[in-house]
Image: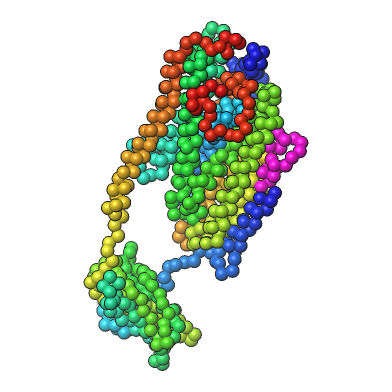
């Protein structure tokens, strides 16, 4: 009974863990917020803030910050260490020119994955000067378009800024066939086959050796049997 | 042992062989009708396709996979009970091992056909062999189940050899007697034959344990190697193994009780056997409870995005009635019922075993269906409700197990006479020996 009580307590703990404060019972969506506004593609060049504006491909809807929103200034530069890639910096300034402190900003890379999509690459909070930065190592070389989204704060409405840079450093391609792992996985079928053969061999041995032994040793009866 | 005791063993174990009374024929007709109904439902499904079942694009595993895991689990319990009792040299095992081994084979035969039923088109089963990939859990499953089936059949056959010889010797010359003679391999009970047989049984008893563990581990990995919430668990394999042993021991208890009553074996299978089996049931049940709590505690505390919807559905959502019915009615209550001292031990243990079996089926349902129904993308849940086809096939295959057992024990002795004679007079070991005496070739 004591064990049962302890077990029940453990189940209750699990339930508390499930329902406890600060825990959501519903799955949290990790999808980035959609573009705040879209406009005709040819308007794109004029809407970029901060960095040198480069027009987006015609297929992509342009990202337009709201007219009355904070300014999101985005700049990029190479990181001190080459393997770190690039530093993407942003500065959030209110319409009246004051830096926005403690604002949450999210950084996205515009990628083509069954159409243009924003891939979340990081998030940060602005400091007292309204600055926030992340380091980013793109997955491929070539042009990268970065979108920085400011979620809004107090009376400030959400806003967005973009920047484009030419990536000359990228993350090494992921290889599923790592040499060490590959040589190991190549051995697995042989090892599995050997184990299987050994097991079948043992079963066959138990059956046939027993059958043969019984057939061969059907000699004189035991003393026990004779007595019976 | 004197000749009188030998004769009483032989008489009790072998009187039903070749005979069929009214109860027997009634049972065979009823069970055959249920099996035929299941067969009809299966033919109906093959003709029309899987759309006649409740399976759908989201919940593509339902009753069939639940039953596959459930019946193979029962088989596992039967084989393990027999193997462990043999290896620990438990004297009280003698009248039970044959029933446990036969239950294991019957349940395995039924469980192993479910992956084919689930395929919808049985001809596609050949693809598993034709296009086998070592990395595919389905191939692991095929290999593990076929190997285990082979081992279970050999494990059933070897201890049967001396009893086949006894059956042969008690029969009048006939065609059937010649078959028994061929199967008995010329057994005469010489010392050399005894040694050879005991070595063979010892090898199989040692082998059947890892084989049975591997089969149920592979079944668990079918779920655990996916990234689905509620399935992707590192303790799924031991959890499945314990669940299988628990439901298997419960099934053995019920089968033993039924054959004891019907075949009049009360003299040989006593309250003591049920008490010992109930100890096994309680120990396994507590072990299962521990594993289950451990799994839910860790998953419930972390609450990652994949697992949370499944846990919510199981604990407080749509599947909560099934989960709490299993936890209370299928685990805690039966274990308490079996553990309590007092009267009606056999009835209580059998009732508890029935609840455990029903509970373990529900638990398999709770593993398979909510895991499948969980939305992998943030939209609606899948829904699953079995149709008459799945229910009929389930009932038909479940009826096949007692039918196989009834028919089997009409041709083969229900108790191992040889083993009972062997342990007769031998002292019960003071502690369980890991290696039995026959493993080293000695006579008991």
Task: Please name whichever residue, B287 or B120, is drawn nearer the observer in this view of the structure.
Answer: B287
* Residue A74 versus residue A112 in the image, above or below: below
Return the x and y of residue A10 as percentages of the image width and height.
62, 56
Whether residue A16 is visible here, answered yes or no, is yes
Instruction: Determine which quarter of the picture holds residue A223.
Output: top right
Q: Identify the residue shown where x is 56% and y is 39%.
A: B245
Colour scheme: rainbow
Q: Is residue B105 magenta?
A: no
Residue lying at the far top of the rendered structure: B173
Q: Is residue B40 above or below residue B226?
A: above
Predominant SS of the magenta segment: helix
- The region drawn magenta spans B332-350
- Quarter in which the N terminus of chain B is drawn: top right
In the picture as drawn, the residue positioned furthest to the right comes out as B343
Residue A74 in the image: x percent, y percent? 33, 81
* Residue at x 49% of width, y 24% of height: B441
User: Does the magenta portion include B340?
Assistant: yes
Horizontal and vertical percent for residue A72? 37, 83
> Is A216 in front, or is B351?
A216
Q: Please tell me in which quadrant of the rendered image residue A175 appears.
A: bottom left
The structure residue drawn at horizontal position 46% and vertical position 36%, both measured from the top left corner, is B211
Lateral position of residue A191 relative to residue B191, left or right: left
Regarding residue B158, the answer to whether it shows in the image is no
Position above or below: A117 against A2: below
Residue B293 drawn above or below residue B39: below
């Amino acid at each position: 009974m004591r064990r049962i009580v302890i077990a029940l307590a453990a189940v209750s703990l699990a339930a508390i863990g499930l329902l406890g404060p600060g825990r959501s019972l519903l799955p949290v969506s990790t999808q980035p917020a959609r573009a705040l506004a879209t406009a005709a593609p040819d308007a794109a060049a004029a809407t970029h803030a901060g960095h040198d504006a480069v027009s987006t491909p015609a297929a992509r809807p342009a990202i337009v910050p709201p007219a009355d929103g904070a300014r999101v200034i985005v700049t990029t530069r190479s990181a001190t260490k080459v393997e770190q890639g690039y530093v993407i910096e942003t500065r959030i300034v209110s319409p009246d020119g004051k830096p926005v402190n403690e604002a949450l900003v999210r950084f996205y890379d515009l990628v083509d994955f069954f159409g243009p999509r924003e891939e979340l690459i990081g998030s940060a909070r602005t400091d007292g000067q309204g600055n926030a930065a992340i380091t980013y190592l793109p997955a491929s070389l070539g042009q990268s378009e970065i979108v920085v989204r400011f979620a809004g704060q107090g009376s400030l409405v959400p806003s967005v800024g973009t920047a484009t840079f030419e990536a000359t450093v990228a993350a090494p391609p992921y290889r599923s066939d790592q040499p060490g792992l590959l040589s190991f996985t190549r051995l697995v079928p042989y090892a599995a086959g050997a184990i299987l053969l050994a097991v079948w061999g043992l079963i066959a041995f138990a059956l046939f050796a027993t059958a043969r032994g019984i057939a061969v040793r059907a000699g004189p009866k035991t003393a026990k049997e004779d007595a019976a | 042992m004197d000749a009188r005791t030998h004769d009483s063993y032989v008489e009790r174990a072998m009187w039903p062989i070749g005979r069929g009374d009214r109860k027997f024929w009634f049972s065979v007709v009823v069970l055959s009708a249920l099996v035929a109904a299941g067969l009809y439902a299966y033919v109906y499904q093959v003709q029309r396709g899987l759309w006649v079942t409740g399976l759908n694009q989201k919940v593509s595993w339902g009753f069939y996979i639940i039953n596959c895991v459930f019946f193979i689990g029962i088989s596992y319990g039967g084989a393990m009970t027999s193997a462990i009792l043999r290896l620990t040299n438990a004297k009280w095992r003698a009248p039970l091992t044959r029933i446990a081994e036969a239950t294991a084979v019957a349940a395995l035969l039924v469980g192993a056909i479910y992956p084919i039923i689930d395929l919808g088109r049985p001809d596609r089963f050949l693809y598993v062999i034709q296009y086998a990939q070592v990395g595919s859990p389905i191939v692991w499953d095929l290999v593990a189940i076929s190997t285990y089936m082979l081992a279970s059949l050999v494990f059933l056959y070897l201890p049967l050899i001396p009893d086949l010889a006894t059956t042969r010797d008690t029969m009048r010359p006939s065609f059937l007697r010649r078959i028994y003679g061929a199967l008995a391999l010329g057994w005469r009970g010489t010392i050399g034959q005894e040694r050879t047989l005991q070595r063979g049984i010892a090898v199989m008893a040692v082998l059947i344990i890892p084989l049975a563990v591997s089969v149920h581990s592979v079944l668990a990995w079918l779920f655990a190697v996916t990234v689905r919430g509620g399935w992707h668990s590192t303790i799924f394999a031991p959890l499945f193994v314990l669940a299988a042993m628990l439901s298997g021991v419960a099934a053995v208890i019920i089968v033993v009780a039924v054959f004891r009553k019907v075949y009049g074996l009360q003299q040989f299978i006593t309250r003591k056997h049920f008490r010992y089996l109930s100890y096994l049931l309680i120990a396994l049940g507590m072990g299962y409870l521990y594993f289950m709590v451990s799994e839910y505690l860790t998953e419930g505390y972390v609450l990652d995005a994949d697992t949370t919807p499944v846990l919510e559905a199981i604990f407080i959502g749509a599947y909560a009635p099934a989960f709490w019915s299993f936890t209370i009615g299928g685990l805690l209550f039966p274990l308490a019922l079996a553990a309590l001292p007092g009267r009606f031990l056999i009835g209580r243990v059998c009732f508890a075993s029935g609840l455990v079996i029903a509970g373990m089926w529900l638990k398999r349902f709770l593993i398979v269906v909510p895991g499948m129904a969980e939305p992998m993308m943030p939209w609606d849940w899948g829904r699953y409700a079995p149709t008459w086809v799945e229910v009929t096939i389930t009932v038909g295959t479940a009826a096949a197990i007692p039918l196989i057992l009834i028919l089997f024990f009409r041709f083969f002795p229900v108790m191992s006479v040889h083993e009972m004679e062997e342990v007769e007079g031998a002292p019960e070991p003071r502690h369980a020996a890991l290696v039995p005496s026959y493993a080293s070739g000695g006579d008991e």
